[in-house]
Image (cartoon, helix red, strand yellow):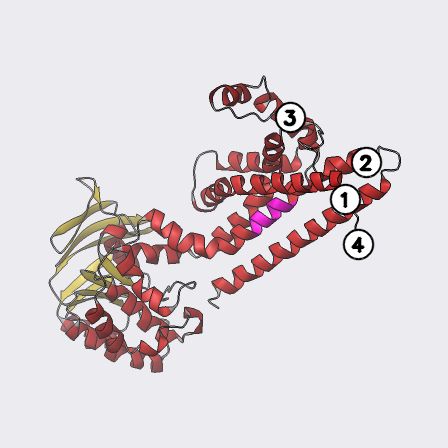
Amino acid sequence: MLRVDVEKQLGEFSLHATFASEGRVTGLFGASGAGKTSLINMIAGLLRPDRGTIIIDGETVDDTAAGIHVPTWRRRIGYVFQDARLFPHLNVAQNLDYGRRMNRLAPDAAQHTRVIELLDIGALLDRRPGKLSGGERQRVALGRALLSKPRLLLLDEPLGALDEARKLEILPYLVRLRDEANIPMVYVSHDVAELRQLATQIVMLRQGRVTSFGGVKVLT
Amino acid sequence: MLDISPAEWTAILLSLRVAIIATLVATPFGIALAWLLARRDFWGKSVLDAIVHLPLVLPPVVTGYLLLLTFGRRGLVGTFLADHLGIVFAFRWTGAALACGVMSFPLLVRPMRLSIEAIDRKLEQAAETLGAAPFKVFFTVTLPLALPGVLAGMVLGFAKAIGEFGATITFVSNIPGETQTISSAIYSLIQTPDGDAAAGRLVIVSIVLALGALIGAEWFARRATARLHGN
């Protein structure tokens, strides 16, 4: 599903990560500064590796030796950021529809209903992002990413900006997403409990290097 | 109320036409330049920035004279445009519009640039991850969020254009009905005996127009902040 072998120099920090994952949810685990966000941004195409390859679903999206770098907007990925990043000038319904419009996909009423029900955001559709709580914003961001029909969903500490109560509010949605949406995910977190609940495979990062890889038990 | 004579109306309407055309033509260039200065790093950026601001600090007579040398009947660009496209600037109202456009350009670009700089680039990244190509990101995220700043820049540019005097009179002279705007009409009236009343009326008209534009620009700027905070 996902094969990564990249090197990147960012100032003093050097990142060199190699892993391949077939898991439904690949957890990228590490302390802050371990290179998790840089790595996921490279998978998204927002950051360009100095050397190496990235293969998503059999398609080579980065290969520095062959001069391949597929731009972010053609990678067909979904990305849920820690800070939701909803478009402030659009209401929730328009935010949800954005990816479909940009990818020129036909309207899919069934999926639309399913995602809105799964995330419980039906009551928010007319609101502007400025009028949403942090948890609501994150659920809309999840829905927006899902409705662009990505082949890989990237989540960068999607619960990081929320307090404990809100985290517990969102986690069940993420578990349902894993079990029902059938989209492989890369989930970045520094929270062991979160990853135990969600991840099926773990990539452990320390100071820019992969230190272990395997099932959830490597977290102990 | 003000008893405005036909000759004064001619000057007022000409000023409006010149300022509106100058603003509308300058706006697309202004947006493009504002985006370039706000979002891109390239060689010579500070030089370009300085050139854009030059009309603000250069004596207007100098700007007008340079326009005359370039776009005049014997100017390099002026000859070309007249021979190949039939566009003549010298001593025409189109020349007044060109002079006003150049003189107001720095004021037009500035609010546009500031509003683009204020947009969180992370939103543009998010749009890219949702499959939006760069030009679509610009038209669906950057431009709508910058719109109040774009409008504010247009209003300010318009206000400057309607009052422009030095470069216009140098470039296209002061021909009633063709290039005599409110400012040059006031200038002529002050030098004429008994012109005081007419000049006074045009002064009031200029003050009203300028004040209206400033209030308008302020209103757009406040809308911009509200919009970015999601209301």
Query: Which residue is painted at 73% across and 38% down in the image?
Result: B183
Is residue B102 visible in the rendered image? The answer is yes
Disc 2 to disc 4: CB gap under 8 Å = no
Residue ID for mark 4: B1
Q: Which of marks 2 and 4 is in front?
A: 4
Q: In this view, does A213 lie above or below B75?
A: below
Predominant SS along the magenta part: helix
Identify the residue at image location x=26%, y=78%.
A171
Q: Which residue sits furthest front?
A: B6
Q: Which of marks 2 and 4 is nearer the N terminus?
A: 4
Whole-Å distance between the Cαs marked 4 and 3? Answer: 34 Å
Please give the chain letter of the residue carrying mark 2.
Answer: B
- Badge 1 or badge 3: first in the primary sequence: 3
Q: Is residue B158 magenta?
A: yes
- Give, as a three-letter code, the residue at label 4: Met
How many residues crowd around disc 1 within 10 Å: few (fewer than 14), some, or many (20 or more)?
Answer: many
Q: Which amino acid does label 2 sit on?
A: Leu
Is residue A29 in sight in this rendering? no
Find numbered disc 4 in the image and state the secondary structure of the residue it sits on.
Answer: loop
Q: In the rendered structure, which segment of residues is drawn in magenta?
A: B152-159
In the rendered image, which residue does mark 3 sit on?
B91
Measure the C-alpha gap from mark 2 to mark 3: 20 Å
* Near-viewer residue (B69 or A133): B69
Q: Amino acid type of disc 3?
A: Phe
Q: Name the residue under label 1.
A: B202
Front position among marks 4 and 3: 4
State the image coordinates of residue A96 (x, y, percent, origin top left): 31, 66
Residue B152 on image: x %, y %:
57, 52
Check if mark 1 and mark 4 are on a common chain: yes
Establish whether labels 4 and 3 are both on one chain. Answer: yes
Magenta segment includes B40: no
Residue under circle 2? B189
